[in-house]
Amino acid sequence: MFFSCFRKPSKMGDNNNISLIKQIYYADKYYDSKYEYRHVVLPKELAKLVPKTHLMSEEQWRAIGVQMSPGWIHYMHHAPEPHILLFRRPIQSQPTN
């Protein structure tokens, strides 16, 4: 079910929405043998839009302003910090350092 709180803003020029989206923090990726992971920290105002009952589809997390390449899965809630979204996807290619 797609909830109305995930609608895209009708005016992309809305300064408040743009300001909130610019405040989203994208952590560096990290890896294990199967997945690459990334956590995303939302401003408190956007965190209110995150459902407590289910994980979000890609369409839903994009609708609240999260911008990442395709294929990321919202895979876990971290109850103590609901403003932090946890994502993963199968490893495509791990960078060499």
Image (tube, rainbow, N blue to C red):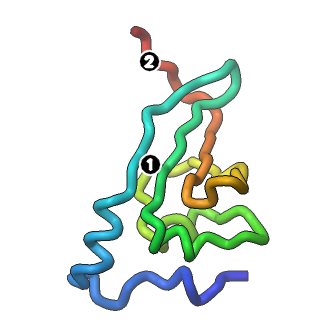
- Amino acid type for the residue under numbered disc 1: Ser
Q: Residue at x 29, y 61 (%)?
A: 22
Q: Quadrant of the N terminus?
A: bottom right
Is 21 left or right of 87, judged from the image as shown?
Answer: left
Q: Mark 2 points at which residue?
A: 95
Is 39 left or right of 12, judged from the image as shown?
Answer: right
Element carrying mark 1:
loop
Residue 77 position, x and y percent, is 71, 54
Q: Which residue is drawn at 67% across and 72% down?
A: 51
- Image: 70 above or below 59: above
Is 95 left or right of 78, judged from the image as shown?
Answer: left
Residue 75 position, x and y percent, is 70, 49
**Badge count:** 2
- Image: 94 above or below 35: above
**Residue 54 appears in which quarter of the rendering?**
bottom right
* Mark seen at residue 12: none
Residue lying furthest top in this view? 97
Residue 92 position, x and y percent, is 55, 29
Q: Which residue is drawn at 46% across and 60% down?
A: 42
- Amino acid type for the residue under numbered disc 2: Pro
Residue lying furthest front in this view? 80
Q: Name the residue under label 1.
A: 69
Earlier in the chain: of badge 1 and badge 2, it is: 1
- Image: 30 above or below 25: above
Q: Which of 93 and 86 is in front in this view?
A: 86
Q: Which residue is drawn at 49% across and 49% down?
A: 40
Residue lying furthest right in this view? 53
Is 43 left or right of 61, judged from the image as shown?
Answer: left
